[in-house]
Amino acid sequence: MPEARAALIAAYMERRPDLLRFFSLRLRSEAAAEDVVQDIYLRISATPPEAEVRNPGGYLFRLGSNLMLDRLRSERRAAARDRDWRDSHRTVSGVEEVVEDAPADAVVAARQRLAAVVDVLKDLPPLTQQVFRMHKFEERSHAEVAAALGISRSAVEKHVMLVLRRLAERLA
């Protein structure tokens, strides 16, 4: 172990209780102070061999203060980002916040309807499935579907009506 690193680690081990007290008071949290003190150790253990530190104790407190400030800035940025996101994704009516998410029962019901639609489509002939997908999901007109598949417009209408009839029976 290089000399500078050894001196820093020795100073760290000696001053660890002081570092914990110092950062606990400033952060008002023993857990946050423990994190900062652990980060100090990680930084000093990665100190380059050629580093020269004249005052290891002062260096540890300065390093910890910088790490603490970085942590506080990061937490403020995250809180501001979360607040901005929350503000852009909610509605306030008077003093009450209005939830914009669909109720859980509505989500479950929508998923069940979607599963029923998928089941109905699976039971139909491949051409009927293709006609329905092109018309409803790709938003093509009956004439466009007929031209793409080489069938009559009347045939497209019959395929779409078959699917709609089956869906009405299944979802009723």
Image (spheres, rainbow, N blue to C red):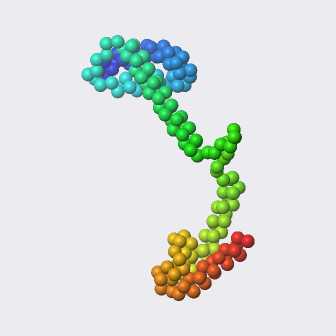
Residue 26 appears in the picture as rendered? yes
| Front-most of residues 153 and 20 | 153
Answer above or below: position of 108 versus 129.
above
* 157 vs 21, nearest the viewer: 157
Tell me the residue at 66%/65% (across/down): 113
Quadrant in which the C terminus appears: bottom right
* Place of residue 166 in the rendered image (x, y in percent of width and height, measured from the top left): 67, 77
- The residue at the far right in this view is 172
* Residue 3 in sight from this viewpoint: no
Determine the residue positioned at 33% across, 24% down.
47
Residue 122: % across, % down:
59, 74
Identify the residue at the far left of this view. 50
Percent coordinates x, y for residue 117 in the rendering: 63, 70
Q: Is residue 169 above or below residue 10?
A: below
In the depicted structure, whether residue 121 falls above or below residue 39: below
Give the left or right position of residue 5, taking residue 153 as reference: left
- In x, y percent, where is residue 20? 50, 18
In the picture shown, does residue 16 fall above or below 46?
above
The residue sitting at 51% across, 22% down in the picture is 33
Left or right: where does residue 15 sit relative to residue 127? left
